Amino acid sequence: MNNPNLKQQVDSRRTFAIISHPDAGKTTITEQLLLFGGAIRQAGTVKGKKTGNFAKSDWMDIEKQRGISVTSSVMQFDFAGKRVNILDTPGHEDFSEDTYRTLMAVDSAVMVIDSAKGIEAQTKKLFQVVKRRGIPIFTFINKLDRDGREPLELLEELEELLDIESYPMNWPIGMGKGLEGLYDIHNERIEFYRPERYEGERFIKLTDGEIAEDHPLKEKSIYEDVLGEVELVREAGDQFDLEKIERGDQTPVFFGSALTNFGVETFLETFVQLAPKPHAHKTDADEPISPYEEEFSGFVFKIQANMNPNHRDRIAFVRVCSGTFERGMDVTLGRTGKKMKLSNVTQFMADTRENVEEAVAGDIIGVYDTGNYQIGDTLYEGKLNVAYEELPSFTPELFMKVTAKNVMKQKSFHKGIYQLVQEGAIQLYKTYLTDEYIIGAVGQLQFEVFQHRMLNEYNAEVVMTPMGHKIARWIDPEQLDERMSSSRNILAKDRFDQPLFLFENQFAMRWFADKYPEVELKSLM
Ligand code: G4P
């Protein structure tokens, strides 16, 4: 479609996800961002989902219990001339492969860290997925209003554990009860935590890195300490480098307190300036597709099934990669060549599902699906005929043996499993010699959804026997010797018949690696 404003619209998009460990403050910060963007009017709208006060939805119990709400999967708002799309990455109990796949649809990520806890397990996992994509990562160190760890120590941990350069955009002046404000290196100013204590000004400009001689902050010893630390970081630390940031080799670090809404707006202002606009996406052809390409294209990165048996509809989440989406347009589904009419399409706002009229690269649209789409599918307009790069599979960590409860219903059991595996809801393995079914997931919720959908959509009751956490590692079939297997490293095969071991723990894996040093152990993403 000919859209004269396409370039300008695309350039205004900022599409990102927030990655963090549960309780670091992702929901609180998201809410603050939505408030700044005018997408919600009061705090508690997003947060409410945890307490049961979530937006109305017709989804079933499991979804409600978990607080998963399709309405908060994508949140869009305008801020400072930019259109911001935040993609939710479900955490807590609803951590799943979808959480990882969402990261395939964003142009940057914001990592939220609890200042008292530092880098935690889930943050690290998500970080690694983002890092491999080579997209920019911005860091927000949260909960400054509480006593946390020293900023220098936190930056060091970031560099050591995550192997990424860090650049502090600002520096806390005190913390917890002693929090005075932020020394804003990037904007050369001080932002006060409680301006009422300091002549009512929230921001004071610095001259040559210093506040005016007669300012009361000058008398505080913490101010001198901060000057010393900032000096140290300037001399010994990494220099701000936009190119490195764009490649994901350096992360700009912001400090703040989401709960008291301190430092969040400063973060957002700088973020929308530095964060990248939508980039070209790789396809099966030599050339990536430019976001300014006139014909519409996009890929499905997530399918959310309706858990309500009365409403079998599903929503396919499509990342728009080029052109302009228009309601009612005709597109081709690349995998099947089938023509599809995109009439029933939603856009996601914080507390409503609204019909979308127009979307461009960077935006996410939710396409009503009656079972046509699969994760990774490409949709395109006209003769564009592209196939976007396949989405990676992620190494599952939790495993269950699964059988049909009723042996008479084997047929629907097999049909259900294969369709749900195709759809990307779960991963399927078999024991190598005996062909028993094992399903793998990255989070517990995937099993529950699987069990529920098997029963409701395929009328197949399943019996699941937990195998617990395992470390899955693939090996070259040529190197396989069945005698390598034991109860601590179960030999299995994936749905492409490739062999892998399910190790009981790190120790079992190291023991194996020592015993068979010639065998290379490979993980998925
Ligand atoms: P999550 O989505 O990353 O899991 O975290 P969430 O925002 O739900 O925050 C987890 C807890 O941390 C919440 O407290 C929240 O109020 C608190 N929190 C978030 N940001 C800050 C901050 O900047 N400072 C302080 N002191 N606390 C913060 P909770 O008691 O678990 O929940 P609630 O009962 O307050 O809702």
Image (cartoon, helix red, strand yellow):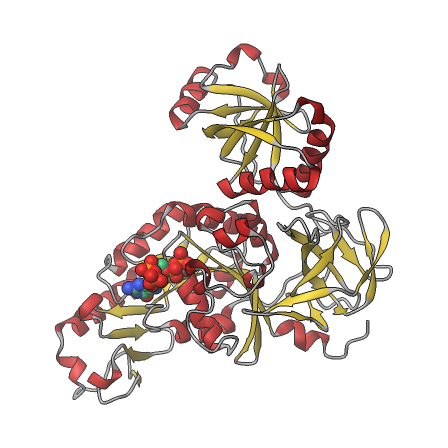
Q: Residue at x 64, y 37 (%)?
A: 454
Q: In the picture, residue 71 is in which quadrant?
A: bottom right
The answer to whether residue 443 is seen in the rendering is no
Q: Residue at x 36, y 55 (%)?
A: 23
Determine the quadrant in which ligand 1 lies: bottom left
User: How far from the left and from the top, in percent, is residue 480?
Assistant: 59, 16
Image quarter of the N terminus: bottom right
Q: Residue at x 16, y 80 (%)?
A: 218
The answer to whether residue 140 is seen in the rendering is yes
Image quarter of the C terminus: top right
Compared to residue 462, the image places residue 486 above or below, namely above
User: How far from the left and from the top, in percent, is residue 406?
Assistant: 65, 25
Q: Residue at x 45, y 45 (%)?
A: 125
Compared to residue 265, the image places residue 28 above or below, namely above
Q: Between 491 and 516, which is closer to the camera in this rendering?
A: 491
Compared to residue 506, the image places residue 306 above or below, namely below
Tally of numbered tags = 0
User: How far from the left and from the top, in percent, is residue 147?
Assistant: 21, 61
Residue, far top: 483
Q: Between 523 and 404, which is closer to the camera in this rendering?
A: 404
Q: Between 297 and 207, which is closer to the camera in this rendering?
A: 297
Q: Between 153 and 345, which is closer to the camera in this rendering?
A: 345
User: How far from the left and from the top, in percent, is residue 212?
Assistant: 22, 86
**Could you tell whether 433 is left or right of 199 in the image?**
right
